Image (cartoon, helix red, strand yellow):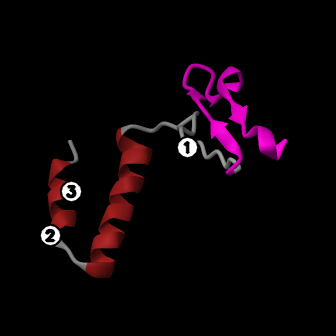
Amino acid sequence: SVDSEIDECQKLLDQERLQCWADLDKLIMEDVVPWVPYLDATNVDIISENVTQYEYDQFSGEVGYAHLAVDESAQ
C-alpha cells in the first residue's frame, strides 16, 4: 500500500509537494504496479459551425457518419 506516502505528500506544500508526487508516481510505476497504458481515451473532434447534427459513436471511437448533417446552404 502507498497510503502512508500519499498522506505524506498531502502534508507538503509547493515544490516539495510536487516532488513528493513525482517520486510517488515513479515508485508506483516502477515497483508497485509496473504497467504501460496502451490506449489513450482522449479524443478531440473539431467541427465546422455548418455541421447541424453530429454524433460520436462510442463503439467505433469515431464520428458516427450515418448521423452527421451539414447545413444545406453551406454546401
Residue 1, image x, y percentages:
20, 41
Which residue is disc 1 drawn over? 42
Few, some or many C-alpha atoms within 10 Å of disc 1 (few <14, some 14-19, many ≥20)? few
Which residue is disc 3 drawn over? 5
Helix, strand or loop at label 1? It is loop
Q: Identify which residue is drawn at 20% across, 56% down.
A: 6
The mark lying in front, picked from 1 and 3, is 1
Three-letter code for the amino acid on which mark 2 is drawn: Lys
Three-letter code for the amino acid on which mark 1 is drawn: Thr
Three-letter code for the amino acid on which mark 3 is drawn: Glu
Which residue is disc 2 drawn over? 11
Q: Is residue 67 magenta?
A: yes
The mark lying in front, picked from 3 and 2, is 2
Give whichever of discs 1 and 3 has the lower sequence position: 3
In the picture, measured across the screen, residue 55 lies left or right of residue 26, that is right
Q: Is residue 25 magenta?
A: no
Few, some or many C-alpha atoms within 10 Å of disc 3 (few <14, some 14-19, many ≥20)? few
Camera-side residue of 35 and 39 = 39
Residue 29 lies, with reference to residue 19, above or below; the image says: above
In the picture, measured across the screen, residue 5 lies left or right of residue 55, that is left
Residue 72, image x, y percentages:
78, 38
**Disc 2 + disc 1, Cβ < 8 Å:** no
Q: How far is mark 3 from mark 2, CA to CA?
A: 10 Å
Camera-side residue of 26 and 39 = 39
Give whichever of discs 3 and 2 has the lower sequence position: 3
Q: Which residues are magenta?
A: 49-75
The mark lying in front, picked from 2 and 1, is 1
Q: How far is mark 2 from mark 1, CA to CA?
A: 31 Å
Give whichever of discs 2 and 1 has the lower sequence position: 2
- For residue 69, the mark is none
Q: Identify which residue is drawn at 15% across, 53% down.
A: 4
**Disc 1 + disc 3, Cβ < 8 Å:** no
